[in-house]
Amino acid sequence: MVEIWSAWRGKGLEDLLTECRELLEDMSFPSVHRWREGGGKVVGHFQVYFPEELAHAAGMLPVKLRGFPIERKVADSHFGSYICSIVRSNLEVALTQRLPLDLFVSHPICDVARNLPSVWRPNFQFPCLLLRLPQNPTARLALDFLEHEYRSLLSRMEEITGKEVTDDDLRESIEVFNENRRLLRELYRIKRERPWLLSVEEGYVLMAVGTLIPRQDHNELLRYALSLIHERQVRPQDKLRVVLLGGFCEQLPRELLRIIGESCYVVNDDLLIGLRWITYDVPTEGNLVRNLAQAYLESDSFSPVQHDPRRPKEEMLLRIIRESGAEAAIIGAAKMCEPGLDEQVAYAKALDDVGIRYFVFDFEEGMVSFDQIQLQIETFVESIMFV
Ligand code: SF4
């Protein structure tokens, strides 16, 4: 198979990170175009979680529609005014044909995302679908239902690529993604245990680039980057250890991550949590589609868009704070994001109850002015460190 992006090869860590940043910010999506030039098909899937193994097994490139730093010219007229930015920038890159797709899939994570297929459908020739991930993973029929959803999605992808997916294809894909999640867990272990080796922005860049290239290539990149990170000569500093939440759907601007990382060690976060949603190796024996569905339902992750009574989100937040040795929390929410803003209130109450300090803010992926928020974060950190 032709490699669709190799700019990182042989580079030192700083240059490798620069290449990743450039790919993430290149709104001509060169890696995706290269994939299609080789005859490949592309599925664009909306945040938060998507079973990318199914797309991989069917021979499609899964591209996470994580929102894009782009000036919007055509997409805004398709939405009302009180709507988050990510749905607009995703539509913008598709309408302007910068990002070529053969299938679009959204999920019922909120009212906005639930209605996206009907907004997209009149504008494109390719199918626009809703993958109905169960809201309550403990519901009696959730597993049967999700397996059925996955099987019908897989059939649609088989129709698009003309490839009949075998168990061996699925097994191979699950192994690739198990490996990817293991590597991402290692990245997060470094952030937790030796956060001075990797800032929150650097970790994000290394993870996010995987949303634009085949996952086996991302695995290679991560393995190489991890070896460089382990060799990095950086001294620990006296910085506040924080958990950062708010990046489950619309993403915080990279510049904001850089600013947070200047003042704090972010020892855990929920940026692109869908890529790390499954926290164990999916079994590669038995009913593989059902295994994937079960892994989604049984995962140990949390975000405002899933309601699992076994894992109240406030408790999960306190747990990750405890497990990562964090001293405080930074809780963001995208502007106009109802799930995020709702959870902010619940998180704040839970943190008040146990006396953990926190900073609350809202953001937009396209924000360009950071002076005020930088000052607020610095003041927050100083109020804890120097009193
Ligand atoms: S940012 Fe919030 S409101 Fe917007 S699509 Fe995502 S979850 Fe829904």
Image (cartoon, rainbow, N blue to C red):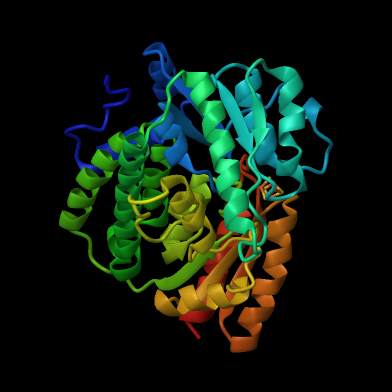
The location of residue 218, given as percent across then percent down, is 32, 39
Q: Position of residue 167 (x, y in %)?
A: 36, 38
Q: Give the tally of numbered discs.
A: 0
Above or below, comparing residue 306 to residue 325 in the picture = above
Left or right: where 3 falls relative to 63: left
Up the image or down, 214 lies above or below 280; here it is: above
Q: Nearer the viewer, residue 280 or 230?
A: 280
Residue 150 image point, x, y percent? 55, 42
Q: Nearer the viewer, residue 180 or 150?
A: 150
Q: Is residue 214 left or right of residue 364?
A: left
How far from the left and from the top, in percent, is residue 239? 39, 71
User: What residue do we see at 80% from left, 33% from top?
Assistant: 79
Query: Who is closer to the viewer here, 375 or 284?
Result: 284
Q: Quadrant of the N terminus?
A: top left
Residue depicted at x 66% and y 64%: 139
Is residue 47 in view?
A: no
- Residue occupying the point 66% across, 32% down: 129
When asked about the image quadrant of residue 101, the answer is: top right
Image side of residue 206 versus residue 137, left or right: left
Q: Is residue 158 visible?
A: yes
Whether 133 is drawn above or below 339: the answer is above
* Residue at 69%, 40% in the rendered image: 85
- Which image quarter: residue 246? bottom right
Residue 45 position (above or below residue 205):
above
